[in-house]
Amino acid sequence: MPSLSRLFGRRRRYDDIGISIQEHIEERVDELEAEGLPRREAEQRARREFGNVALIKERSREVWQWSALESILADARLALRRLRRSPGFAFTVLLTLAIGIGTNTAVFSVIENILLKPLPYPDSGRLVALWLDAPGAGGLANFSSGLQLSASMYLTFSDHNRSFQSLGIWAPGTANITGVAEPEQVQGIGVSSGVLETLGIPPALGRWFNQADQDPHGQKSLILSYGYWQRRMGGNRNIIGRSIQVDSQTRTIVGVMPRGFRIVDHDFDLLVPLALDRSHQILAGFGYNGIGRLKPGVTLGQADADIAHLVPVWMNSWSNGPGTNPHYYEVWRIAPHFRWLKQQVIGNIGNVLWVVMATVGVVMLIACINVANLLLVRAESRQQELAIRSALGAGRARIARELLVESLLLGLLGGALAVGAACGALRLLVAIGPADLPRLSEVSLDAASLGFTLLLSVFSGLFFGAIPALKYARAHSSALNPGASRTASTGRARLRSRNILVVAQVALALVLMVSALLMIRTFAALRRVEPGFADATHVESMSITIPGRLEPDVHTVAQMQRQIADNLAAIPGVTSVGFAADVPMDGDDPDWDTIAVEGKPYDGGEGPLRLFNFVSPGYFNTMGTRLVAGRDFTWDDLSNVSPMVIVSESFARDNWGSASAAIGKRVKKYSSSPWQQVIGVVEDVHVHGVDETAPPILYWPAAFYDRFWSSPALDGLRTVTFVVHSNRAGADEFLSQMQRAVWQVNPNLPLASVRTMQDLYSQSMERTSFTLVMLAIAGAMALALGVIGIYGVIAYSVSQRTREIGIRLALGAQKRELKWMFVHSALVLTAAGVLLGAGAAVALTQWMKALLFGISPLDPLTYLLVPLVLAGAAALASYLPARRAAGVDPVEALRAE
Amino acid sequence: MNRSSDRRDLFPGALEIMILQSLRLRPMHGYALVKHIRQVSDDLLEVEEGSLYPALQRMLREGWLESEAGTSAKGRPTRIYRVTEAGVRHLESEVMSFERMFAGIARVLAVAKA
């Protein structure tokens, strides 16, 4: 190991060696001269006898070095100097690498943070999402994720289970806060006891909910999120114990959760205790998210088996009210289907991310190939130098090392720049990333990402460096022959490895372009789907909640809603107004319940589950949802609470054969409920997004009788989404007019989720458009790099073969033939690449199946179009240098040598 | 630089011993060292420059030699190598182990002849 003093003394040592050797040779020369040789001859002989001076000096110096590392450093310094001398080359390579490695790092960070890292809760490997399976529940087939828990299930499971350390249920919702500033609708989450204990994150301030908070008759409390605390309370630490009005109920703040804390994948402003009243619970109400923390060592299968035993206990313990059969749910065949919480959070986004990662990986490969090509050209121009050095005694390994050190240096410099590029790319990704990308807030450039960058830099450096290193380390001394570059055949042999690279590049570009085109065709197919509403840019939507504390009487609530609708309709430029429990594609289903069609027998007496919505008159008109048969509701229908229903076209077709046949037919919810007459049929609506089939839907009037009350009484919706059709939708002034229209009815009503239907529509396609944009960018980059690659190879071969071209021209070759010769060779390379790439694409695009819509991964049009585009690009890229070849003046070409 | 193929390689450590022994007689510069060894061995041994200079640096590093600026017979600047205390100790222990080895080899060869 070199000590400091030795490092300082080294320069002197090196000088000593030089002086010693110099004198050694001089003395030998003197001696030989004394023996009678002429001075010149004596010098030559002395040097020959001594051997390779440079090598011996180097060996002697190495004694003082931390040898391998230091000489590599020296190589690196040399490489750096050489790069400075060719800034164009350095710039191109470094830019290519910075972009290539940078995007890879960015996407890797996303994958690492979203897919690989555990959830941000202590010992999160034991957290489980409690979902149930109910294969017998008919309409539940529409739920991709299964059946959620009811409150009574939670109580039974939490009382009797043996597998969970803790478990709880939670449900997100909105809450109106009044008295702090302007009335504001915030995101609230109702949590049972067990939820915070399961997640295990202590509060930043105050405490979790305790048993007294969860007592339905006890104190009313709440916990704030860090964000809300900062935003509305100014981060005041004396906030604990203070009260605020939530949905017109006074609640005491008992805690503040730390920054970044989320309930599974939900951000919130405040948590309220569910405070379940055991005496009021029924079997139904499967609307709660369940989470649990397994006891150490318990597997998912054991937990499933444990809870499966409790399903009968649950049915024995509760009922749906007098006269109902508690064992009705046996038909549903309810069974636990628990899954790891992380899997629940990530969902199927992993699919998209891996495709994106593979895509940028392929772009990186293409970029590396381009760099390798550049390095090959560079090494070629240095061939004479390398050959001379090899003749002077530089070993093959020594030269290979030098070339590798150079490319490694390029890789590392590129990697350093890539970190900057990755920061930018991550910001871009977060900006354009789909809103449903889970855990996006957790994404950052961390140590693992930087490690990945380093690895990628080194590997790419070795990869694109290995090709020239392997090829030129054994530079033949024949290269010393100044005539070597004159023969056409040498050029051809040298071209071979560049040709292989171009074929690889075309193949990779084809894979990317096929993927991109498949996504474009998917997007087009999605756009062609009729969503079931029209003129979405001109339909504004907003949701309004009238809490029971603010207005207990449902009749008044219904009047207020109609009043708001009337006020909205009076705004200048508004053509129609309506409201519904939920609008399509907002991510919520208003209700699912059983429905029985008159004259049809059903197992267990109840019909299958169907999606419900509750609508006001004018809602369909405003949304542009076509009425296929019959008529819309009227306000009289609502105020009379007429037993009427409107059904979707598919429901009508499934049950009565056609839309018109449905009018006048009757359906009912439960055996005990009254029959309801079908008065209208509307077109199918893709409520879950255009890529999902449109489910059969029943539209009830927005005012109806509650099903569980023994004597029918009016019930209605407290949260509705208003839709307003106007050419002025989206304008700021229009929004404030809408706000005034609402506040004329009650100034304590906040407007929430204000957006146009177009926003919702685009949002539902976000995942597709995100994948599309990423693949399109990658495909375009691949095409550009591929074209540059082909251009480079042909242009180089033209320049190498100028003399040959001159001879051909002199012998009478036609210019057209000459041009064709070069274009033809480019097309041959392209064809080889296309064949290889098509094979790879067929295999790889199978992974994309889940992302495609309306087309097969083997879409013939795509597989026809992409090779044509590539061939066209290749022809163009080779035509330019070919034209130059044809323009060669034979006299000039021959004289140039 | 294989100038004579019939001359076999020295075994490891032999070069060091010869250098130390030669320099122990008097400090010398590189070329003088080569000439000295050749003359003393009656041309039987030839030190190759390719091994000599790295070996000198190795021995300097080990502290067996030291070098100082000097002039050659012709008045040109060169470096004179000199054995240190440690060098002498190393030489003596090496010579001893060599002698034991030679004795061993000689005995084995004698038995083989008989």
Image: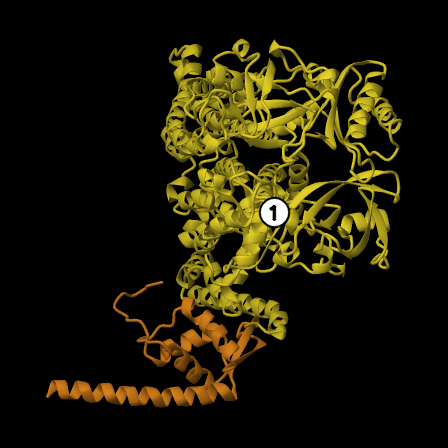
Chain colours: A yellow, B orange
A839 left or right of A6 in image: left
- The residue pinned by badge 1 equals A151
Please state the chain letter of the residue tagged with numbered disc 1 in the rendered image.
A
Identify which residue, A651 or A36, lies in the foreground.
A651
Total marks drawn? 1
Element marked by disc 1:
helix
Q: Where does residue B111 sit, x and y in percent of width and height?
A: 14, 88
State which quadrant residue A835 falls in: top left
- Residue A406 seen in render: no
Residue furthest out toward the left:
B114
State which quadrant residue A539 falls in: top right
Task: Determine whether A99 is above or below A261 in the image.
Answer: above
Identify which residue, A507 or A223, lies in the foreground.
A223
Residue type marked 1: Ala
Q: Where does residue A684 sit, x and y in percent of width and height?
A: 57, 18
Identify which residue, B57 or A891, lies in the foreground.
B57
Q: Residues within 10 Å of mark 1 (few under 14, many from 20)?
A: many
Identify which residue, B100 or A267, lies in the foreground.
A267
A77 left or right of A176 in image: left
Q: Where does residue A86 sit, x and y in percent of width and height?
A: 60, 40
A310 left or right of A396 in image: right
B86 left or right of B4 in image: right
Task: Determine whether A188 is above or below A837 in the image.
Answer: below
Q: Residue at position x 52%, y 46% from top? A: A343
Q: Residue at position x 66%, y 15% from top? A: A534
Q: Where does residue A404 sit, x and y in percent of width and height?
A: 48, 49
The N terminus of chain A - image quarter: bottom right
- Residue B1 seen in render: yes
Task: Determine whether A177 is above or below B98 in the image.
Answer: above
